[in-house]
Amino acid sequence: MVPVLILNASYEPLHVIDHRRALALIASDKAELIERARDGREVRSPSTRLPVPSVIRLRRYVNVPQRGATWSKAGVLARDKMTCVYCGAALMPKTATIDHVLPQWYCKRHHIPANTWANTVTACRACQSKKGGRLLHESGMKFYDPNYEPRRPRANYLVLTWSANSEWREYIPLP
Ligand SMILES: [Zn+2]
């Protein structure tokens, strides 16, 4: 059994499941493959060979009841200490804007809520307009602090019951 990290459509980690369940979700088109298992393992059936996944993503957003603080613009600015997450500039309430990591049009199209802790960050106007309506990886921009991760204050954390794979590093903060 190979543990597979399953992400919500919003790329937030949801759970760890076994690869057979992950393959069933892919086969029924409920999820897409994001990362294959690093060792290149495959599952064979008489007609096909499928790569064993390491990370998959649900095609439709699943609403997860969440504990912790309710989202607010002021809360995002406070969480990010009024600092632009892209260039590190210290901002004033007047100059600070909220940037959507997954752009609002993208969220709308895929029925993902845009105003969530994980999807909103503090940005200066220059960085926000530089990123424009693009996805973060398309914009070529990075968080100023490589360890930064937008999250709900006092969020409920994903509890890993398996040892984590290195491929998951991009999606969940690992020690
Ligand atoms: Zn900036």
Image (tube, rainbow, N blue to C red):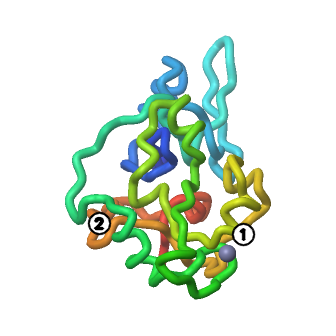
Residue 51 horizontal/vertical position (percent): 66, 35
Q: Residue furthest bottom?
A: 90
Q: In this view, which residue lies farthest toward the front? A: 94
Q: Quarter of the picture for ligand 1? A: bottom right
Q: Closer to the camera, 159 or 102?
A: 102
Q: Which residue is drawn at 52% across and 38% down?
A: 107
Q: Is residue 42 above or below residue 35?
A: above
Rendering quarter of residue 34 = top right
Q: Distance between the residues labelled 2 and 1?
A: 30 Å
Q: Quadrant of the N terminus?
A: top left
Give the residue at mark 1.
126
Instruction: Give the vertical position of 82 relative to 119 (above or below).
Output: below
Lower position in the chain sequence, tag 2 or tag 1: 1
- From the viewer's perspective, is 152 left or right of 123? left
Three-letter code for the amino acid on which mark 1 is drawn:
Ala
- In the figure, is residue 143 to the left or right of 26? right
Callout 2: helix, strand or loop? loop
Going 54% across and 40% down the picture, which residue do you hit?
A: 56
Name the amino acid, label 2: Ala
Q: Which picture quadrant has residue 47? A: top right
Q: In this view, does 129 lie to the left or right of 149?
A: right
Q: Nearer the viewer, residue 28 or 96?
A: 96
Foreground disc of the pair 2, 1: 1
- Seen from the viewer's position, the closer of residues 35 and 2 is 35
